[in-house]
Image: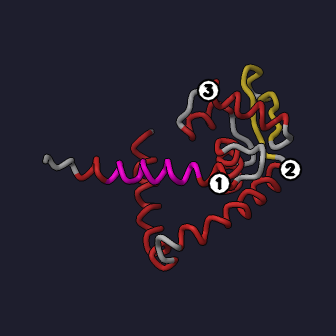
């Protein structure tokens, strides 16, 4: 039996965890809200963003522009975001979160709290808190490498 490289094993575990958590997240979110929509709402609130272009959002989420445009159109229809023309460039758009979007993000966070006992059955709260700084360091380091 051959041994896989450490980096592969590391990212393989992260990938499998991502798949499992994505399913849990999707099942916990309020009806009609997708993981992608929640991620956009969370992005605006977490980074305290007032406005951002669809192209910049697509880049931030590493998805193609048409994919982001489709997500944003559904979000605008639901009143979660507003999309307006960029006054500096008539060909571009700017996206901002609405009060309804902020409220929905909070509803999502509350809904996701139901996952806490499930996670705590697998890993202690203290262990999660100890892992968070390293996970943030990994995320920030990988984020810098992609640009």
Discs 2/1, front: 2
Q: CA distance from mark 1 to mark 3?
A: 21 Å
Q: Quadrant of residue 88?
A: top right
Query: Where in the figure is residue 109, as x and y percent of width and height?
Result: 71, 61
Under circle 2, the secondary element is helix
Q: Quadrant of residue 58?
A: top right
Q: Would residue 131 appear left or right of 67 to someone viewing this image?
A: left
Query: Where in the figure is residue 83, as x and y percent of width and height?
Result: 80, 33
Q: Would residue 72 appear left or right of 142 to someone viewing this image?
A: right
Q: Quadrant of residue 32?
A: top right
**Residue wearing tag 2:** 100
Q: How many marks?
A: 3
Q: Residue at x 49, y 74 (%)?
A: 129
**Residue wearing tag 3:** 65
Q: Nearer the viewer, residue 71 or 62?
A: 71
Q: Nearer the viewer, residue 129 or 117?
A: 117
First in sequence: mark 2 vs mark 1: 1
> Is the residue 57 above or below the residue 23 in the image?
above
Query: Where in the figure is residue 118, as x and y percent of width and height?
Result: 57, 68
Under circle 3, the secondary element is helix
Query: Where in the figure is residue 119, as x and y percent of width and height?
Result: 54, 68
Q: CA distance from mark 2 to mark 1?
A: 18 Å
Q: CA distance from mark 3 to mark 2?
A: 24 Å
Label 2 Cα neighbours within 10 Å, binned few <14 / some 14-19 / many ≥20 = few
Is residue 21 inside the magenta stretch? yes
Discs 1/3, front: 3
């Amino acid at each position: 039996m051959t041994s896989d490289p450490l980096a592969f094993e590391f990212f393989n575990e992260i990938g499998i965890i991502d798949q499992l958590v994505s399913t849990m997240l999707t099942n916990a979110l309020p009806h009609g809200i997708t993981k992608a929509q929640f991620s956009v709402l969370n992005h605006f609130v977490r980074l305290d963003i007032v406005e951002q272009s669809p192209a910049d959002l697509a880049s931030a989420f590493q998805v193609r522009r048409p994919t982001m445009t489709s997500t944003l159109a559904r979000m605008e229809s639901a009143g979660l975001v507003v999309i307006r023309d960029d006054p500096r460039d008539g060909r571009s758009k700017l996206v901002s979160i609405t009060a309804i979007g902020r409220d929905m993000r909070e509803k999502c966070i509350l809904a996701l709290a139901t996952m806490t006992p499930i996670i705590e059955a697998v890993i202690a709260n203290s262990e999660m808190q100890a892992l968070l700084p390293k996970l943030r360091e990994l995320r920030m380091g990988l984020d810098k490498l992609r640009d």
